[in-house]
Image (tube, rainbow, N blue to C red):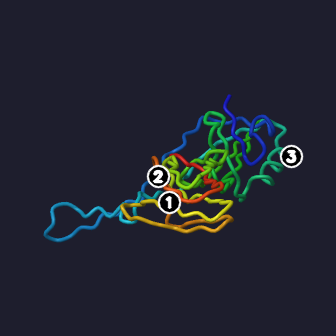
Amino acid sequence: MSDIRFGTKWAHADYGLIVAPYAIPMPEPQMNFVEIPGRDGALDLTEAFGTVRYADRIIPLMLYARAPFDTLISAFASDVHGRRMNMIFDRDPTFYYDARMTIEDVERHWGYCELSLECRVKPYKLEHFETAITVLPTGNATVALTNSRMPVVPTITTSAEMTLTFTISEKDYTVNLSAGTHVIPSLVLMDGDTGIDIAGTGSITFTYRKGAL
């Protein structure tokens, strides 16, 4: 029997609910095609801002409760209905989903009850733990930051002044950092490896969370 965690509690293990078979849809790409008179085919502007963007996923769920169920339904609704929380599916436990929960309907029958849920979740499923990469440059060093499909800007913590050089979307950047914690908006990690040249001494740590489709 499959189970789903809503926040900190599991539908079956904690509430005693039965999870019906479900499907997790792929997020819909936000595609943009422009028809231009005199041109064969449409102009595809889907990646005009550097990458494909996606709409939220809508995951419908059906849960069943055995009688007596009134107290159970009340407790579950109080914990879940209308709230934003992390969801974990036991069939894909490496990731969690950032979701807004809605109980659409409660249908009571003789001896059991059906709960219809709509889960509006962010397009990417997220890894539970952040990736942290520390480099100890002694003058000059190079690091490759590996990322999954979700674009992400890492948090950078340095123990001393350092200079970073990197290339994003064929544009070269050079950034001087003082000791402390920084976010560089132009340093967007895409799918694959992003190489960064580091000049300085001390330690530097890149922290980010990966997301997948």
Residue 195 is tagged as 2
Q: Residue at x 46, y 48 (%)?
A: 193
Residue 188 is tagged as 1
Ranked by sequence position, the earlier of labels 1 and 2 is 1
Residue 61 locus on image (x, y percent): 62, 44
Ranked by sequence position, the earlier of labels 3 and 2 is 3
Residue 166 is tagged as none
Crowding at label 3, few (<14), some or many (≥20) Cα neighbours within 10 Å?
A: few
Q: Amino acid under label 1?
A: Val
Ranked by sequence position, the earlier of labels 1 and 3 is 3
**Residue 56 falls left or right of residue 132:** left
Circle 3 is placed at which residue position?
A: 71
Q: Nearer the viewer, mark 1 or mark 2?
A: 2
Q: Residue at x 42, y 55 (%)?
A: 29
Q: Quadrant of residue 114?
A: top right
For the N terminus, give its image quadrant.
Answer: top right
Q: Secondary structure at mark 2?
A: strand
Q: Secondary structure at mark 1?
A: loop
Q: CA distance from mark 1 to mark 3?
A: 48 Å
Q: Amino acid under label 2?
A: Gly
Q: CA distance from mark 3 to mark 2?
A: 56 Å
Name of the residue lying farthest toward the top: 1
